[in-house]
Image (spheres, helix red, strand yellow):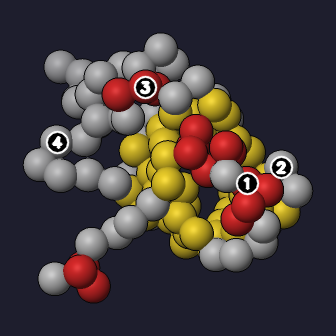
């Protein structure tokens, strides 16, 4: 069962341990900052927020279908100075889609709720 569990550091934990982690591969999780997604030829640049910390993520590859503002995301990659270089993005969800608790200042509680 452990092989099916995705372990990750929150943005605030990852920032706090960035010097210790160096360039080793890890996963960080947070909510996509609204308006921060910028597509480019090799993928996208965006920011993740959680616990009062924000990180710039440079993603190389294709994004998941549900990748959008406020999406609860886990990015797989490594640090490149103050930027997180990602080669895989996972949308973190259970039966409901919600941004991390500490991201509600910039994201609504249910970003995937359809407007009626």
Q: Secondary structure at mark 4?
A: loop
Residue assigned mark 1 = 18
- What is the residue that sits farthest to the top in this orientation? 105
Image marks 1 and 2: residues in contact by CB distance under 8 Å: yes
Foreground residue among 116 and 99: 99
Frontmost residue, 46 versus 28:
28
Mark toward the viewer: 3 or 4: 3
Q: Determine which residue is flagged by label 2.
A: 82
Element assignment for label 1: helix
Question: Which tag, 4 or 1, sits closer to the chain's start?
Answer: 1
Q: Is residue 87 left or right of residue 71?
A: right
Q: Nearer the viewer, mark 1 or mark 2?
A: 1
Characterize the local packing of mark 1: few (<14), some (14-19) or many (20 or more) Cα atoms within 10 angstroms. some
**Which residue is depicted at the point 68% across and 45% down?**
15
Question: In 3D space, how far apart are the residues under numbered discs 1 and 2 (Cα atoms)?
Answer: 8 Å
- Which one is earlier in the sequence, the residue at label 4 or at label 2? 2
| Disc ID at residue 96 | 4
Is residue 99 shown left or right of residue 63?
Answer: left
Q: Is residue 61 above or below residue 103?
A: below
């Amino acid at each position: 069962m452990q092989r099916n569990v995705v372990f990750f550091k929150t943005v605030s934990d990852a920032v706090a341990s960035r010097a210790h982690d160096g360039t080793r591969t890890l996963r960080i999780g947070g909510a996509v900052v609204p308006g921060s997604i910028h597509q480019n030829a090799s993928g996208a640049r965006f920011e993740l927020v959680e616990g009062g910390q924000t990180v710039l993520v440079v993603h190389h590859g294709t994004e998941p279908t549900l990748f959008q503002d406020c999406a609860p995301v886990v990015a797989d990659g490594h640090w490149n100075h103050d930027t997180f270089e990602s080669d895989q993005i996972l949308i973190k969800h259970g039966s409901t889609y919600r941004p991390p608790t500490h991201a509600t200042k910039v994201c609504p509680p249910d970003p995937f709720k359809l407007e009626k």
